[in-house]
Image: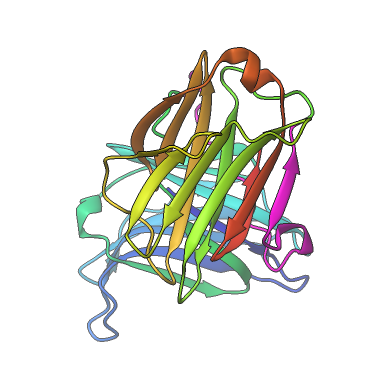
Amino acid sequence: MVTLQGVVPLDARRFQVDFQCGCSVHPRPDIAIHFNPRFHTTKPHVVCNTLYLERWQAEARWPRLGLQRGASFLILFLFGNEEMKVSVNGQHFLHYRYRLPLSRVDTLGIFGDILVEAVGFLNINPFAEGGIEYPVGYPFLLKSPSLEVPCSRALPQGLWPGQVIVLRGLVLPEPKDLTLSLRDEAAHVPVTLRASFADRTLAWIAPWGCKKLISAPFLFYPRRFFEVLLLCQEGGLKLALNGQGLGATSVHQQVLEQLRELRISGSVQLHCVHC
């Protein structure tokens, strides 16, 4: 899944997002998927196509355009087994069947009249999503004061089965640790998740200080993007890191319902926190 966040300039004519099979200039590389919104025509529209051996194939056109000049946007490209689906600002927009093997794609090209704010390469949520067509693509908040670390988020109703905490960001160049703690109204901390970069371990920390190591590869790296998901289920929390499920920890449902705050601290720059 690829997310593209940005703004369409007021005088925009067109831009394109190309999923390319290489990055050479001569000869021009094959383009498995060419996504091309056009604003300058009488009826703005989107063209999708494939470039093979420097020849364009038959165009596929969509007469309506879910993007507007002067407006911000969040585009999500979701790659299935046989086709790509695209949503714009949370609404399904189009689907395009592959004409070249997706395994050949190794380069993303973005060209034309577009102000790019963020590009995200995200894994699909490993937790079941109850038939939702697209995973939820929360916007990246860049340099937002509300995401300065240490960061706090209220949980006014506690945590209930099916609720997912989403945390996305960037590990700093010389990281020491990352701590996620869940607190109740009395400031007790029944749930803590801690990543230690010194010994490259990930662990649940009990309220009395006992550490339960998570037996999994350490997937945090300096200057690299990360995504942490915590899924609340009956009697516990399931953890996923960078799209990989890492098991669960047991927490009484009553304790989960009494949680009131999520706190994040450590050697990271946050771009998205959703509870």
Residue lying furthest front: 208
Q: Is residue 232 visible?
A: yes
From the viewer's perspective, tell me whether residue 172 is left or right of residue 242: right
* Picture layout, residue 175 above or below residue 94: below
Residue 262 pos. (x, y %): 67, 41
Give the residue at x 57% y 31%: 164
| Quarter placement of the C terminus | top right
Q: Is residue 40 magenta?
A: no
Q: Is residue 123 above or below residue 189?
A: below
Identify the image quadrant of residue 162.
top right
Q: Residue at x 45, y 76 (%)?
A: 174
Say how the picture is coloured: rainbow
Magenta region's main secondary structure? loop
Range covered by the magenta-colored residues: 129-155
The reply to whether residue 134 is in sight is no
The residue drawn where x is 73% and y is 43% is 153
Q: Nearer the viewer, residue 224 or 196?
A: 196
Task: Report the side of 157 relative to 56 (left or right).
Answer: right
Q: Tell me where residue 38 sits by quadrant.
A: bottom right
| Image coords of residue 260 (percent x, y) | 74, 31
Image height of 199 relative to 189, above or below:
below
Q: Is residue 149 magenta?
A: yes
Residue closer to the observer: 8 or 124: 124
Q: How many marks?
A: 0
Residue 57 in percent (x, y) is at 31, 57
